[in-house]
Amino acid sequence: MDNINNKYDVSFRISGNIKSINFINKTLKISPDYYYDTGSKIGMKNDKMVKRGDLRPGIWGISSSSTTDKIPTLIENMLIKLRPLKKELLELKSEGLKLDFFCGYFADDIVGGISIPSKLLMEIGLLGIDFELSFYYHIKRDSTE
């Protein structure tokens, strides 16, 4: 049984030397939920503006999170948008950009796991998309410890 405090995040990301958000937006006809140019400002550290360095890739992404829908369902919902764009996705990949699903599973304890159907993994692979899964556990400690 799922813990009500579990959370599932999925992002479809395109990363690499992204010179223009407009190029990706026009190619895919999708607007991103977030976007960072290579060298773009990303925040403050020690009172100085931190930039994505030349070695840090630009990132274009769409994301979804839920406390009820699990990772396979979130991926499937994104694939509804991405399936018709197979040619365009493979073209972006051939230009040296990385495509991936970055999935996060946030849980209160270390009981349980994630099951991804093989058919879904195969479809992701055929679209040229890598798959990454990270687990983030927030272990509740007994107050006597």
Image (spheres, helix red, strand yellow):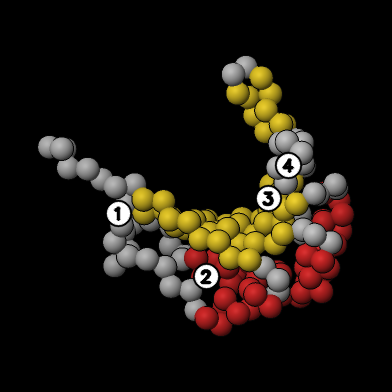
Q: Give residue 50's position: percent from left, percent from top.
A: 67, 28
Residue 43 relative to residue 91: left or right: left
Choose the circle earlier in sequence order: 3 or 2: 3
Look at 63% across and 78% down and name the residue there: 123
Q: Which residue is mark 1?
A: 109
Choose the circle earlier in sequence order: 4 or 2: 4
**Label 2 CA crowd tier, 10 Å (few <14, some 14–19, many 20+):** some
Specify the amino acid type for callout 2.
Thr
Residue 116 relative to residue 128: left or right: left
Q: Which residue is mark 4?
A: 55
Alpha carbon separation for disc pair 3 and 1: 30 Å
Q: Is 42 placed above or below 3 here? A: above
Alpha carbon separation for disc pair 4 and 2: 34 Å
Q: Is residue 29 visible?
A: no
Of circles 2 and 1, which is in front?
1
Q: Secondary structure at mark 3?
A: loop
Residue 57 relative to residue 115: left or right: right
